[in-house]
Image (spheres, grey):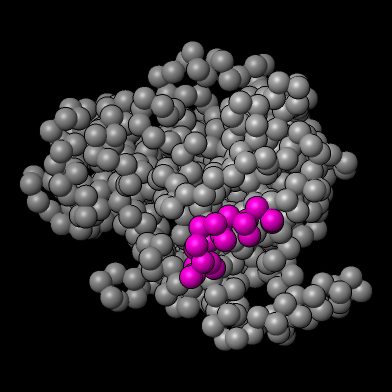
Amino acid sequence: MEKRNFFYTERKQFKNIHEYLNTCLSNHADNILFKFNKNGTSYGKRYKEVFDDILSLEAALSEWHFEKKHIAILGKTSYEWMVSYLGVMNAGYVAIPIDKLLPVEAIIEQLQFVDADCLLFDNDYHDVALKIKEFVGSIKYFVNFNEKSDNMHCLYDMLKTPHKDIKSEISPDTAAEIVFSSGTTSNSKAIVLTHENLASNIAYCSQVIDVSVTDILLSILPNNHTYELTAGILTPIYFGATICLNDSLKMMKRNLKTYKPTIMIVVPAVLEMLRKEILKAVANQNKNEKFSSAMKITKILKKVHINVSRKLFGEILEVLGGNIRTFVCGGAFLPVEIIDFYTTMGIKLIQGYGITECSPLVSANTDRNGERGSVGKIGGGCSVKIVDNEIWVKGKNVMKGYYKNPEVTEACMENGWFKTGDLGYIGKNGYLYITGRKKNLLVLSNGENVSPEELEGKLLALDCINEVIVFGEDDVIKAEIYPNYDLFEGRDIEEIEAVISKEIKEINSLLPMFKQIQKIKLRANEFEKTTTNKIKR
């Protein structure tokens, strides 16, 4: 029997995304849904305008014959991308967000694998689309977001299609989207998420993320990931909030100042990057001592329930636009030192745990129900149990399965429970703690198991380290480190290694012997990353 958590305020559970969008877009008709920059000009689209475009796209798509109704979407985050994504699901078709950073060969592999019928794409990927047209025979329709060329359709022509009175009877068990986990089809899985999966997770996200009609979100994460799509796009629509579209990570600093967001959906790497930007701004203003004193004073005053964060840090928070109130963080282990940094400055930090197969949110800390260092209590309609230190999840948010891969689906499911591959435990008062990934676990000859993510989190909290991988070799725990070379300007490699070794010695002093890092190796360049900016192990 599923356990439900009494402390979350219940939200309406919609049957499908069609019902959800039709209700919410109508309820907030005059509010601004999307803000974006296009060719140097700023635009704002109201909920009713977005609804109008979605219905036109649905009407245009209904005139075409699809074998599978599998509609792939490729391109940078843009208004056209968002209308395509929402419009496809609203019509009852299956949206397939494609990672724009993949090589064309990998994109072709994925599209062939999921039997795509149609591709909607950004004009920047026109040459890629021509290559896809040559090799993916299942795709009968190609739609360029911006222009008509090479016998391809244009999205803006489709958005002129008169609305039809289309009543979509979509079963909750119908597939809404297929999302690839990572990489190419040789090492990734195509995850099928249903309308019920997404609707249940939106309901949960809306309980834990404190959003209001006046809030402004800045969308910065990849548009092919469920974390951004469910928590950062679909959920704010429930409240009538405004979502500002970030052109690229290069433009994030500019967009922070332009849009002045109140809420951001982030991953630990983004929080670490922004932390360094704040510290850089402090140093540039020669306010290191003042900042350090303010952090100490704030921590002391908070113990007696006096909050002066905004007064002391208001000026420095202009780096983030000046209005940021909440970060919602997921995707990887988050060191408590990073949590303390932001919360001391008065920014609420909601740390969640999710996985694509669970649509994705499983648990989250809130300001009302939080436990430092944990990823919160289990979400509404979802249950968790720990089996041999592995986290298993059961509930309405758990995927339908892996597309065309019944063997792998069967292997990761047991009596309705999904085996996440993540390691963790449930602590006092029912809070969930993540300790690492099962496949990364270091098993030592003395029988002890060490999670490299735990140690990496401690090292990444040091200003002198930018990136790190902890690994085991010959029963010895080692760390390969990419230092923060900006901090060591003018110093040779021996000096840098001496400073980092001293810091690690202090960390080791607080760890049991079997967990201690015994050797380090410094590298000259950053680690190779996945398209989600995670280090390739």
* Closer to the camera in the image, 51 or 102: 102
Question: In screen coordinates, is 509 left or right of 43?
Answer: right
Question: In screen coordinates, is 210 left or right of 158?
Answer: right
Q: Which residue corresponds to the image point at 60% horizontal and 19% vertical from the top-left?
A: 413
Residue 83 coordinates in the image, percent (x, y): 36, 54
Question: In screen coordinates, is 204 left or right of 28?
Answer: right
Looking at this rendering, what residue extends furthest in the left direction? Answer: 150
* Closer to the camera in the image, 404 or 442: 442
Residue 436 coordinates in the image, percent (x, y): 65, 36
Q: Which residue corresponds to the image point at 79% horizontal and 43% vertical from the top-left?
A: 511
Image quadrant where residue 469 sits:
top right
Instruction: State which region is magenta.
Output: 484-503
* Closer to the camera in the image, 214 or 270: 270
Residue 443 coordinates in the image, percent (x, y): 67, 24
Q: Is residue 194 above or below residue 507?
A: above
Residue 497 lies within the magenta run: yes
Q: Which residue corresponds to the image point at 79% horizontal and 53% vertical from the top-left?
A: 372
Q: Main secondary structure of the magenta part?
A: helix
Residue 276 visible in the current orientation: yes
